[in-house]
Image (cartoon, coloured by chain):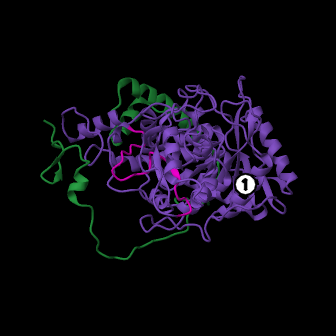
């Protein structure tokens, strides 16, 4: 019985629980048992309230929550040594919203420290393994959430996406990941990385589940003045065709940087769009290629400011070493932060420092304007912009740890959309052989839409998902 | 190229103590990243307004109503060194 329960999508489980066919205790217990067998290092801790309370659209659903969301009385570290042992006095609005919809928290998932990374190798508590191949990364920074859902250790999860941190790991783990429009979901209680970019969203098995979670998560929150919610809500996707919809492929979509296997799946997916009645054409997005440059100035600049709060005074780690106040700050931050976090604090501090501010931060903000304008122009003629989610399938653990810039390039297709604040979804589109050979791995297809057009985005993704019929599972040789 | 002296200066601004090995590595890595970032220097951005935020919101205000803040003991519970209802820190004076 319990293994059959684990096969249900969230929408199916909610229906069966609501109909009284399955008890929420039984369902939650099955997941708790499954999560306890985590052999991917996907969870940092598991909680006891998985079944949730009360009726609601997510009644009885245990959700895996990225450890960047504050949970009252439950350790929240953002996978950083500097927050080891921290028990927040309050709960993030996103988690409260899930609970109000009847869901519970199954556990807190591993991640790149402070959400900085694309491989989950920057966690202070060890890397997460990809459920499809344990020698490969699950992507990041929401790698624990993606591996938990992809590896069948959770029915669904939430994560955060600053430059691709939901979409890229979703792609690498063969699941659906949605980054909502900036402002759709409250950031209150979400440990800040880059405040003008950070956004919470769902990681799920299918598009209908993503819509279900988004509906619960979205909305205005008086505690986050930038949250506005989605007018009319997220809806439930129902569309089965793509007639009358126009899909843009960026004219500048580089051929060289995309793995041949990924390119093949991408092209096959474009054919499927046409098969469903959608139109595919190229559109110029000339500034998207500068996304990585602008992002790796803007995000570290905001991070260097946000992370100034970790000083060993109010919470978290304080270095043992005696000395004066300045020495305490410097030692605490030296001991508490990992390499990538230090790198980004340095980069951000440099970009904001006197004499360099205009050359870096000022210019990056202007590039951001140009990128947003490119998308606005494309959306005058098209409904969506599509790309591969990631230029490659999951890479090997350790493959890019010595080359920060190569790691940053994993976000080539996700970052420009983040800078423009737009919603985008990654859906599994098939399997491809990694460069250098080996068993085939999941490939994600990314669809971006105009701001707050989540309903239309989910509808199209649902139709395309039905046509793709991705049913491969980790450990199997199934065809996607 | 980022020089060693610049790394040390920025580390001081960021309140980060870096080991000798970290300083060397950081100089190389930051140089590599900034070399890539410098490509935006080729773009003509003269007339372009900067974007600091994508949501068209300005001066969002809440009602000015008094409400209780966090109880002092709840907040101090997480502090590494609470004392007499406050956060205790080492002296700012070097000894």
- To which quarter of the image does residue A173 belong? top right
Decide whether residue A109 is among the magenta residues: no
Q: Who is closer to the viewer here, A257 or A166?
A: A166
Chain identifier, purple in the render: A
Chain letter, disc 1 residue: A
The answer to whether A225 is drawn above or below residue A282 in the figure is below
A307 left or right of A414?
left
> Percent position (x, y) of residue A330?
29, 37
Decide whether residue A65 is among the magenta residues: yes
The answer to whether A360 is drawn above or below residue A237 in the figure is above
Q: Main secondary structure of the magenta part?
A: loop
Write down the residue under mark 1. Answer: A461
* The C terminus of chain A lies in quadrant: top right
Question: Residue, x 64% and y 47% (percent of image)?
Answer: A205
The answer to whether A375 is drawn above or below residue A436 in the figure is below
The answer to whether A195 is drawn above or below residue A313 in the figure is below
Q: Who is closer to the viewer here, A255 or A107?
A: A107
- To which quarter of the image does residue A476 belong? top right
Question: Dot 1, how many residues are within 10 Å of its Cα: few (below 14), some (14-19), or many (20+)?
Answer: many
Question: Residue, x 41% and y 73% (percent of image)?
Answer: B61
Label 1 element class: helix
- To which quarter of the image does residue A454 belong? bottom right
Q: Which residues are magenta?
A: A56-80
> Percent position (x, y) of residue A448?
69, 54
* The N terminus of chain A lies in quadrant: top right
> Percent position (x, y) of residue B60?
45, 71
Q: Is residue B73 visible?
A: yes
What tint does the image give chain B? Answer: green
> Percent position (x, y) of residue A176?
65, 47
């Amino acid at each position: 019985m319990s293994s059959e329960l684990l096969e249900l999508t969230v929408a199916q489980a909610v229906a069966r629980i609501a109909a009284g066919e399955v008890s929420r205790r039984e369902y939650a217990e099955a997941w708790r048992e499954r999560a306890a067998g985590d052999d991917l290092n996907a969870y940092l801790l598991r909680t006891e309230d998985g079944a949730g309370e009360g009726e609601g659209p997510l009644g009885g659903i245990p959700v895996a929550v990225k450890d960047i969301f504050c949970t009252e009385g439950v350790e929240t570290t953002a996978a950083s040594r500097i927050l080891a042992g921290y028990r927040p006095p309050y709960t993030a609005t996103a988690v409260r919203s899930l609970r109000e919809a009847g869901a519970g928290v199954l556990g807190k998932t591993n991640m790149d420290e402070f959400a900085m990374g694309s491989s989950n190798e920057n966690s202070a508590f060890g890397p997460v393994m990809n459920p499809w191949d344990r020698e490969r990364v699950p992507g990041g920074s929401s790698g624990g959430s993606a591996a938990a859902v992809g590896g069948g250790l959770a029915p669904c999860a939430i994560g955060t996406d600053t430059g691709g941190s939901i979409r890229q790991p979703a792609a690498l783990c063969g699941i659906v990941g949605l980054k909502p429009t900036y402002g759709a979901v409250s950031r209150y209680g979400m440990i800040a990385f880059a405040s003008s970019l950070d956004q919470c969203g769902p990681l799920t098995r299918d598009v209908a589940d993503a819509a279900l979670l988004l509906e619960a998560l979205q909305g205005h929150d008086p505690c986050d003045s930038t949250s506005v919610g989605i007018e009319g809500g997220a809806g439930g996707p129902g569309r089965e065709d793509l007639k009358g919809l126009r899909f843009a492929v960026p004219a500048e979509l580089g051929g060289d940087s995309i793995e041949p296997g990924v390119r093949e799946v991408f092209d096959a997916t474009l054919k499927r769009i046409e098969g469903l009645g959608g139109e595919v054409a190229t559109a110029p997005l000339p500034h998207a290629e500068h996304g990585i440059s602008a992002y790796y100035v803007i995000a570290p600049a905001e991070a260097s400011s946000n992370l100034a709060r970790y000083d060993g005074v109010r919470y978290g780690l304080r270095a043992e070493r005696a000395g004066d106040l300045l020495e305490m700050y410097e030692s605490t931050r030296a001991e508490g932060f990992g390499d990538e976090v230090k790198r980004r604090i340095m980069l951000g501090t440099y970009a904001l420092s006197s004499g360099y501010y205009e050359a870096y931060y000022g210019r990056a903000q202007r590039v951001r304007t140009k990128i947003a304008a490119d998308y606005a122009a494309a959306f005058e003629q098209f409904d969506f912009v599509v790309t591969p989610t990631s230029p490659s399938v999951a890479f090997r653990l350790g493959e890019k740890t010595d080359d920060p810039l190569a790691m940053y390039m994993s976000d080539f297709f996700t970052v420009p959309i983040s800078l423009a604040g737009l919603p985008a979804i990654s859906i599994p589109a098939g399997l491809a052989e990694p460069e250098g050979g080996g068993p085939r791995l999941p490939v994600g297809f990314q669809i971006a839409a105009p701001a707050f057009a989540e309903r239309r985005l989910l509808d199209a993704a649902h139709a395309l998902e039905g046509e793709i019929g991705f049913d491969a599972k980790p450990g199997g040789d199934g065809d996607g | 190229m980022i020089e060693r002296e610049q790394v040390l200066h920025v580390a001081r601004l960021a309140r980060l103590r870096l080991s000798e090995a970290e300083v060397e590595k950081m100089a190389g890595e930051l140089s590599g990243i900034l070399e890539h970032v410098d490509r935006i220097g080729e773009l003509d951005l003269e007339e372009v307004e900067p974007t600091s935020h994508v949501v068209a919101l300005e001066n969002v205000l809440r009602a000015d109503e008094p409400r209780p803040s966090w109880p002092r003991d709840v907040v101090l519970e997480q502090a590494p060194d609470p004392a007499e209802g406050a956060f205790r820190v080492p002296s700012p004076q070097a000894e």
